[in-house]
Structures are given as structure tokens and as C-alpha cells.
Image: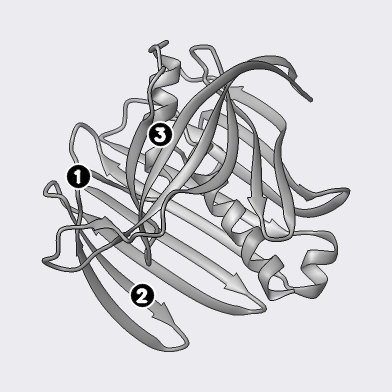
């Protein structure tokens, strides 16, 4: 059961990477809003909600909330909140991950400088730890890497080659590769969508404060696939996440644009 819970948390983290447009606003400010359902077969595991703010701010903000539902909330309840703040036009980035499982919280705060380096502070069961890592290129957190990919799709770029990102999730460093596959029509509650499918793979990297990051030797791991709408809106509509328990599906349920000027 613990493996199942970990698989679900992993799926939520990956979703958070791919649902974010340029900035997320708090409260009821104008912007884009979306709701997703996480399921394993017929079982309803979790709900996700996000709000996407209008462009124009000095900072780009991302936020996503997730909460367990159904049997998952009875067996192993969890909450996830992911936040990212990036200075517009700069490489600096602040990220925070909050996860609560069975009532026990843990938190990761990371700062990415304009140099390829990240500094992280962990809090878990009253203990605080700090870590620093030298990165092999511009770093991303669990939200910002997909911001970059979605922007490219929205601009209509011909993404025929692998799109590689250096991603730090607060405790592990990976190359995350998005490989363009077929263009497919996906049926959603907001209508039929013509979407580009990307296969996702990750390669774990060894790292250290002064150590040049390099592949750890485990090879690339298949993660699943995501579908992003081929339009200026570039709406992520679905993800299939391969977990130890089987396939976890994350699907769009509702979407609303709330009047950006």
C-alpha cells in the first residue's frame, strides 16, 4: 500500500510540472482556471485545482493544489501544494513543495540562482537540513520546466527533437526529456482537442555542492505521456503515468478563461 501511495504522489508531482501556463494567481483574480481528476482504473484517487493569472507581472507565479479522494483519503490521506516564483526575464527561481501524508507534513524550499546552482532547505519531523547542488545547466523545479515546454507549444514551434530539462524536485536531480510523438484527438469535457503527445523519460543524476552532475548509470526511465493542445492556448489535457500499481490517469475535467485584458 505504501508503494501505491508513493506512486500517486509521484503522479501528482508530474502533473504539476505540466499544467502551468505563464503565471498563477491567488484567490479570484483574473486568469485561467482548470480542474483535473486523478484515477486508477475506476478508482477516484485525487482532485487537482489550479488558477493561472494574467501576464504582465514582474514575477511569474505557479501554484497547484491536490487532495486525496475516495478510498485513498481513507487509507492514506494526502495533500500536496506546489509553488514557484520566477523573476521575469531572469534565471532566478524560488520553489516550495509541501506534502502532507497521514497527517505528517514535510516541506522543501529551493532557490535557483542565475548561475547553475540550487540551494534547498528541508523540514521534516522537526528537523531542518540544507543541501546545495551544482547543476549541468539552467535548473527547473516541478512547475517551471513545463512552463517552458508549454510556451514553446503555444508559440507553434516545430518540436521535432527531444526537449531536455534539468529538474530538481527538492531531493533528486534528473534530466527530464519530453519526446514528441503522434498528434492525436483527445475527447474531454470541454470538447475535442487536437493534441501533441509527448513521451516522458527521466535520467537520475549524481550531484554535489561542487561536483559536476552526471548520469548515475541507471539509464533512462519511462514515465508515461502527456498530451498538450496544439493551439496558442496550449492546454494540457491528459497524462498517463506508469506507476508500480499500473497506469494512473490524470484528465482535464473543466477549464475557464477569466478575462485577461
Q: Residue at horizontal 41%, vertical 38%?
A: 177
Residue under numbered circle 3 = 147
Counting other residues with Cα less than 10 Å from the Cα at mark 1, is it few (<14), some (14-19), or many (20 or more)?
Answer: few
In front: 67, or 216? 216
Counting other residues with Cα less than 10 Å from the Cα at mark 2, is it few (<14), some (14-19), or many (20 or more)?
Answer: some
Question: Mark 2 or mark 1, which has the lower sequence index?
Answer: 2
CA–CA distance between discs 3 and 2? Answer: 24 Å
Q: Quadrant of residue 160?
A: top left
Instruction: Give the image's coloring scheme.
Output: one colour
Q: Position of residue 231 (x, y in %)?
A: 53, 12
Q: Quadrant of residue 245?
A: bottom right
Q: Residue at horizontal 44%, vertical 17%?
A: 154
Q: Quadrant of residue 110?
A: bottom left
- Quadrant where the N terminus sits is bottom right
CA–CA distance between discs 2 and 1? Answer: 23 Å
Let me know if residue 26 appears in the view: no
CA–CA distance between discs 1 and 3? Answer: 17 Å
21 vs 258, left or right, is left
Question: Mark 3 or mark 2, which has the lower sequence index?
Answer: 2
Residue under numbered circle 2 = 122
**Residue 137 numbered mark, or none:** 1
Amino acid at each position: 500500500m505504501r508503494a501505491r501511495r508513493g506512486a500517486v504522489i509521484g503522479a501528482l508531482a508530474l502533473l504539476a510540472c505540466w499544467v502551468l501556463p505563464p503565471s498563477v494567481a491567488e484567490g479570484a483574480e483574473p486568469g485561467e482556471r482548470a480542474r483535473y481528476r486523478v484515477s486508477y482504473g475506476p478508482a477516484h484517487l485525487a482532485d487537482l485545482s489550479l488558477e493561472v493569472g494574467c501576464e504582465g507581472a514582474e514575477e511569474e507565479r505557479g501554484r497547484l493544489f491536490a487532495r486525496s479522494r475516495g478510498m485513498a483519503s481513507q487509507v492514506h490521506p494526502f495533500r500536496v501544494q506546489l509553488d514557484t516564483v520566477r523573476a521575469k526575464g531572469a534565471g532566478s527561481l524560488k520553489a516550495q513543495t509541501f506534502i502532507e501524508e497521514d497527517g505528517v507534513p514535510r516541506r522543501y524550499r529551493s532557490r535557483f540562482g542565475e548561475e547553475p546552482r540550487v540551494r534547498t532547505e528541508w523540514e521534516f519531523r522537526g528537523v531542518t537540513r540544507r543541501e546545495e547542488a551544482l547543476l549541468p545547466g539552467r535548473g527547473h523545479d516541478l512547475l517551471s520546466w513545463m512552463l517552458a515546454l508549454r510556451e514553446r507549444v503555444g508559440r507553434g514551434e516545430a518540436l521535432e527533437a527531444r526537449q531536455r530539462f534539468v529538474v530538481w524536485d527538492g531531493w533528486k536531480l534528473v534530466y527530464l526529456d519530453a519526446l514528441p510523438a503522434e498528434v492525436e484527438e483527445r475527447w474531454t469535457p470541454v470538447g475535442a482537442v487536437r493534441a501533441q503527445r509527448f513521451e516522458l523519460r527521466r535520467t537520475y543524476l549524481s550531484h554535489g555542492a561542487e561536483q559536476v552532475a552526471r548520469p548515475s548509470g541507471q539509464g533512462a526511465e519511462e514515465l508515461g505521456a502527456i498530451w498538450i493542445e496544439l493551439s496558442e492556448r496550449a492546454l494540457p489535457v491528459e497524462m498517463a503515468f506508469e506507476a508500480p500499481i499500473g497506469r494512473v490517469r490524470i484528465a482535464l475535467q473543466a477549464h475557464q478563461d477569466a478575462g485577461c485584458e
